[in-house]
Image: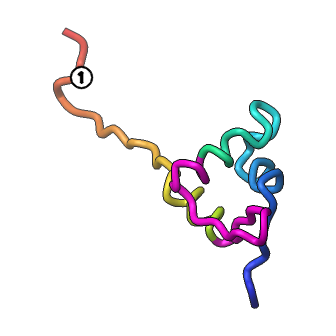
């Protein structure tokens, strides 16, 4: 199945930045070449799989702290 091409507005909604900055953040990602995009004439489109890969690559996993003897109260 072919990847769906998303508009910049759809990408903003998908990554959750639409409410704060509208299309500004996805357009900055495009301008800084931090995300792959497709030019269709004068339009910019981003593959759905690229957006998912961007989200996955920028997901920070929580740190699990192990209890140690150094953390005991004096």
Residue 8 position by quadrant:
bottom right
Task: Rate crowding at label 1 as few (under 14), some (14 to 19) or many (20 or more) other CA atoms within 10 Å.
Answer: few
- Image quarter in which the C terminus is found: top left
Residue for badge 1: 71
Query: Which x, y percent locates residue 59?
Result: 52, 51
Toward which corner of the image does residue 36 lie, by quadrant?
Answer: bottom right
Can you name the residue that lies furthest to the top here? 74
Query: Measured along the vertical axis of the image, is residue 62 above or below residue 57?
Result: above
| Residue 63 vertical position relative to residue 33 in the rendered view, above or below | above
Is 32 placed left or right of 23 in the picture? left
Q: Residue visible at 22% across and 33% down? A: 68
Instruction: Give the residues in magenta.
Output: 29-49
Residue 33 drawn at (x, y percent): 52, 55
**Colour scheme of the picture:** rainbow
Element marked by disc 1 = helix
- 35 vs 65, left or right, is right
- Number of numbered discs present? 1
Which residue is pictured at 78% across the width and 70% down the height? 41
Q: Magenta span has 38?
A: yes
Residue pictured at 67% horizontal, 70% vertical: 38
> Which quadrant of the rendered structure holds the N terminus?
bottom right
Whole-percent x, y for residue 5 in the image = 77, 72
């Amino acid at each position: 199945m072919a990847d769906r091409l998303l508009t910049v507005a759809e990408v903003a909604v998908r990554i959750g930045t639409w409410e704060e900055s509208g299309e500004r953040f996805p357009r900055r990602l495009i301008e800084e070449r931090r995300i792959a995009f497709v030019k269709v004439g004068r339009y910019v489109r981003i593959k759905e799989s690229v957006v998912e890969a961007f989200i996955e690559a920028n997901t920070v996993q929580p740190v699990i702290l192990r209890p140690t003897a150094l953390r005991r109260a004096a």
